[in-house]
Amino acid sequence: MTTGRVRRAWLGVAGVPVPLPPPLAERLGQKLGLRVVEVVPGSPAGTAGIYLGDVLLSAGGQPVQSVQALQRLMLGPAIGKNLPITVLRKNALVDVVSVPTELG
């Protein structure tokens, strides 16, 4: 309100929902993850070490099962703050930390 516009955070990643392997889905209590199909070079996601083919499982402690779930985390307060992300990479859980920037 004070700036006259809505500030949105940006990661620089695009993904599609994919089913998780049943044992992992049961352990995490979620059926889907978000497979990374694009990482913008030099983006916060790229800098954090997120790669094509990774499956986003959680961000900021919240499950990521859809693009909408990830977008809900990209509000103004997320800009410039550490965002812990857990991905599934080659059957291993990998934790990275991204710092979303302002979508401009």
Image (cartoon, rainbow, N blue to C red):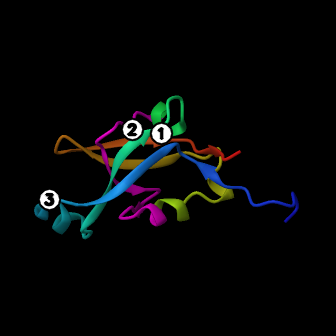
Which quarter of the picture shows residue 37? top left
- Which span is picked out in magenta? 48-69
Q: Position of residue 104 (x, y in %)?
A: 71, 45
- What kind of residue is marked 1? Ala
First in sequence, mark 1 or 2: give its number: 1
Q: For the point 24% across and 64% down, which residue is it?
A: 28
Front residue of 59 and 17? 17
Which quarter of the picture shows residue 27? bottom left
First in sequence, mark 3 or 2: give its number: 3
Which quadrant, please, contains the N terminus? bottom right
- What kind of residue is marked 2? Ile
How far apart are the two marked residues, 3 and 2, measured between alpha carbons? Answer: 20 Å
Instruction: Provide the residue designation for mark 2.
Output: 50
Q: Are marks 3 and 2 in contact (CB under 8 Å)?
A: no
Front residue of 64 and 36? 36
Which secondary structure, mark 2?
A: loop
Q: For the point 58% across and 45% down, which residue is it?
A: 100
Tag 2: Cα neighbours inside 10 Å, few (<14), some, or many (≥20)?
many
Instruction: Provide the residue designation for mark 1.
Output: 45
Q: Are marks 1 and 2 in contact (CB under 8 Å)?
A: yes
- What kind of residue is marked 3? Pro
- Residue 88 in magenta stretch: no
Q: Position of residue 74 (x, y in %)?
A: 58, 57
Instruction: Provide the residue designation for mark 3.
Output: 21
Tag 1: Cα neighbours inside 10 Å, few (<14), some, or many (≥20)?
many
